Image (cartoon, grey):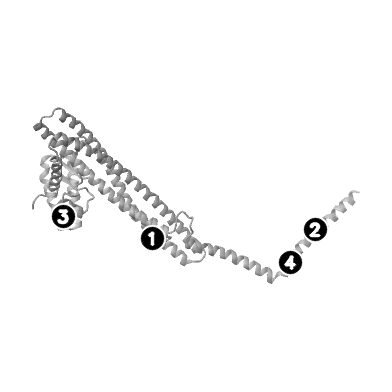
Amino acid sequence: MIVRILGEGQLVLEKDALAELNKLDDDLMAAVESGEQEKFEGAMQALLGKVRELGSPLPVEELKPSDFILPSSHSSLDEVRDLLSSDGLIPG
Amino acid sequence: MADGVMKRMSLIFKSKANKALDKYEDPRETLDYSYQKQMELLQKVRRGVADVATSRKRVELQMKKLQQEGDKLEGQARKALELGREDLAREALTRRANISAQIGDLNTQYESLQNQEENLVRQSKALEAKVESFRTQKETIKATYTAAQAQAQIGEAFSGISEEMGDVGMAIQRAQDKTAQLQARASAVDELMASGALDDPSGLAKDDITRQLEALSAGGAVDDQLAKMKLELSGGGNKALESGNGNGSYAAKSDEISDADVLKDGGAA
C-alpha cells in the first residue's frame, strides 16, 4: 500500500503494517478531537515516524494515488482539523 | 469512531480528483486539460521557490544589519562606562537586548522558511518527474484509445497526478503564508529603523546615544581647553616669563658657542 505524507512524498509499505498504523491513527484522531496540543504533537510524530520507519519511497516518476494521506509534520492542530472538516483547503 | 485521519484525508483528495475528472466527457480532453494545469502549477512552484529565496535573503541581510547594530551598541555601552555615564551604558545595553530579541525572533522564522524552501525545491523536482511521466502516459493512452480501457488507465495516472498537485499546491500556499509573515515582520523592523526607534545601522544618521557620547568627548576636550586658557589668563605672567627664560637661555647658549668659536678661531690663529 502507498501512504503519502504531505510535503514529503509517497512511501510504499507492506499491507500488514496497516494494523499498527490504524492504532496510531486512532490515537491521532482522538488527540485531534481532544484539542490537546501536546497529545496531538506526540500522536502525529508517532504515526509519521512509524510510516517513515516501515516505508520506502515510491520512485518520483511513478503516478499512483495513495491509499492513505497524512498531514505534513509541521501542521498545527488547527490545520489538521481544517483539513479534515473541509475539502476547500486543497487547491486545484 | 469512524475513519481515522489518514483514510479521511485520502478520501478528501480522491473526491477532489474525481470532481476534476468528471468535468469532461471525453477522457482525452481531461488529459490535455490536466497537463496544462500541471504545467501552470510547475511554473507556480518555480516562482514560489524564487520568492521564498528572495525573502530569505532579505531577512538574512536584515539580521546582519541588526547584528552590527547590536555590536555598535555594545561598544557604546563600553565607551559610556569609561566616561562614567552608567545611565547611558544602561540605555545602550537595553537597546541591545531588544535587538537581540528581534534577531532571535527573525532567526526562528528564518530557519522555518529555509526548511520550507528545501521542501519546496524537492517537491518541485518530484512534480516535474511526475508531470513528465504523465505526459508519456497521456500520449500512449491517446494513441491506443479505447474508451473503457482508457478510463481505467486514466483513473490511476490522473488520481496520482492530482494528488501530487494538491500536495504541491498546499506547500506553495504554506510557503507563501510564511513568506508574507516574514516579510511583514521584516518590514516592521525596517519601519522601526526608519522612525529612529531602532537606529539606522548604516551609521549615516546619528542616534541619541552617539550624540551624547560625542557631546561628552567634545565636552571633555572643551573642558581641557578651558582649563588651559584659564591657567594662561590667571598665571599669564609666569607663563610669559617661563618662555622668556627659555629664549634667554637659548640666546646665552648661542653666545657661549660664539665665544667658543672665537676662542677656537683665536687658538688656531
Would you identify the image quadrant in which residue A12 lies? top left
Q: CA distance from mark 2 to mark 3?
A: 103 Å
Give the numbered dot on residue A16: none
Does residue B43 show up? yes
Q: Quadrant of the N terminus of chain A?
A: top left
Residue behind mark 3: A32
User: Measured along the vertical axis of the image, is residue B268 above or below residue B231?
Assistant: above
Query: Which residue, given by chain and number where applicable, does mark 4 sit on?
Result: B240
Q: Give neighbour class at mark 1: few <14, some 14-19, many 20+ (Cα, 10 Å).
A: some
The amino acid at mark 1 is Asn
- Please name the residue shown 10% across and 30% down the image: B146
Q: CA distance from mark 4 to mark 2?
A: 20 Å
Mark found first going from the N terminus, 1 or 2: 1
Which residue type carries mark 4?
Ala
Residue A89: percent from left, percent from top: 19, 49
Q: Position of residue B189 (x, y in %)?
A: 38, 56
Q: Which residue is mark 1?
A: B98
Q: Earlier in the sequence, mark 4 or mark 1?
A: 1
* Chain of the residue under label 2: B
Residue B258 is situated, as x and y percent measured from the top left of the image, at: 84, 55
Dot in front, 4 or 1: 1
